[in-house]
Structure formats: C-alpha cells, structure tokens
Image (tube, rainbow, N blue to C red):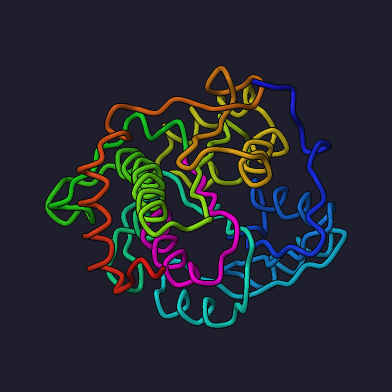
Amino acid sequence: MTDWTAADLPSFAGRTVIVTGANSGLGEVTARELARVGATVIVAVRNVEKGRAAAAGMRGDVDVRKLDLQDLASVRAFADSVDAVDVLVNNAGIMAVPYAQTVDGFESQIGTNHLGHFALTNLLLPKITDRVVTVSSIMHLIGKISLKDLNWKARPYSAWLAYGQSKLANLLFTTELQRRLDAADSVVTAVAAHPGYSATNLQGHSEGKVSGTLLSLGNKLATNADFGARQTLFAASQLLPGDAFVGPKFGMAGPTGLSTRSPLARNARTARGLWDLSEQLTGTKFSI
C-alpha cells in the first residue's frame, strides 16, 4: 500500500488512452489527469455534447467520440474508428437502475457494465499495446453470476443484485482475459480497479426512494471522485501483475494498492463459462 496520488502519474506523452464514460464522475477525472500528463485521450461517451463540455475543462489532447455501450452497433462503429490505443479504460457504468433492456435485448446493467465493454475490448484488442483496465466495485461482493439467466428474464428483477452481478462479471472477465492473453504470449495485461465508495452522479440514477435516501446519506461519508479515480489511474499507470485488482486498503477508503475479491470472483470455471456466453451474446471473440 502507498500514499500514491494522481500527482505521481508518469508521463503519458506519445500514448493514446480510451476512457469510456468520461463525461462525468470517475471517468472525467481519469481522462483529465491522463491528458494532463501528455496522453492523447479519447473520451468515449454516449452523449457527445456532455463529452465536449467535460473535455473543455481538460488540458491536453482530448478527442470526444460517440460510444453507446447499450448498442452493439455503436460499439462496433466506435472500435472501427480507432487506429491504435495503448490503454483501454472500461469505466462507464450504471448502478441499481430500474429494469430496462439495451438495444440488443440485454438487461441494461449487465449490458452496459459487462457485455458492452466485453465487445469493445475484443474488437479493440489487436490495436491495444499495453493494458485493459476495467472498473469494478466492492459491490461485486453481493454478486452472483447466473449463466442460465444472465439477463434476468426468468428471475424476479433486483436492481442491486443485477448491479452486483455486473460488477462480479467485470472481475471474472478480467481473469479470463488475462488467462487468454498469457496463453497467446501477449504483452498486453488485463487489470481491474474499484474506487471504494466515491460520491459521483452514478448514485443519482439508482432505483427507488429507499436506495436514493441511503445513497444520499452514504455520499456524506464518501470519498470524492478524485480519490475514486486514483485507483483507476494507479491501475492504468503502474507496473502490476496481470489480473491485479486495485483499490483502497480499507475497502471504501485508505491508501491505494492491491485489493481482495470474493471467492466467486476467483472461480475460473465461471469465468470461462461467462466468457463463452458473452461471446455468443455479443458476437465477438478474443482476437489475438
């Protein structure tokens, strides 16, 4: 564990980084700090106007592009627009929202938080030179993967359990991606990070008055977006082993370093099963 902060970022001059969901919250801070140290940052956002407004407050080379993770056609179009990238930061996400479906018929949280990023990563993988950083959450601890009903078509929908499933999927995705990268003798690494509990606009879209009240109270005790993004920036810039999981020492706060994950997040068989199912659902495959 260290007292590392964004002020300790090395130079990213000459490097290109994609940050999804970089128009606000953790993604905006991540993009801002990487641009500050010289990276060419591609701000990949669903709402281009909001992306441009966020980019206006960043110093450096920032390019705003359309990416809707709830639409696989948009994911493919975005991937086609990228020539080369050093670091991909899978940051965008939604949390504990009412039941909805993506354009392709996926439950919106697994569709946005996992399947959209799964497809994006596979499509970009031949162009990535350094690493893939995927933002998970301590809420993966409540998650359980249902390979038979990933999209909540048979189960009674729970906004929080669906969120937990999607964040657990982020970790299993990272594990299986790293296994495949190792098997291919690739120099690319896959790592994950979680912000602890940071007060961002993510909480403002959660389902129900009770959730909203609890989150509002929790936000009074939470760290800020700069602290949350610190974990992502550490994962994007420091020398780490493949499948590393970065987070605050005390779960919600504390110095940045390697974090622990649930036993379910260490299940290699589930990771492989989720990968196979995700390939079927998105029509994308490991491409190295």
Quadrant of the rendered image containing residue 117? bottom left
Q: Position of residue 219 (x, y in %)?
A: 60, 29
Q: Quadrant of the N terminus?
A: top right
Q: Main secondary structure of the magenta part?
A: helix
29 displayed left or right of 46? right
106 vs 145: above or below: below
Position of the C terminus by quadrant: bottom left
Work out whether 39 lies above or below 235: below
**Residue 86: percent from the left, percent from the top?**
64, 62
**In x, y percent, where is residue 178?**
41, 49
At a point 39% along the width and 53% down the height, the residue shown is: 177
> Which span of residues is magenta-colored?
112-136
Residue 115 shown in magenta: yes
Q: Is residue 15 shown in magenta?
A: no
* Residue drawn at x 58%, y 38% as measured from the top left: 240
112 left or right, relative to 236: left
Q: Nearer the viewer, residue 177 or 7?
A: 177
Q: Toward which corner of the image does residue 84 lie, by quadrant?
A: bottom right
On screen, residue 90 above or below 102:
above
Q: Toward the viewer: 268 or 288? A: 288
Left or right of 25 in this view: 196: left
User: Would you place residue 103 above or below residue 101 in this image?
Assistant: below
Q: Residue furthest right?
A: 59
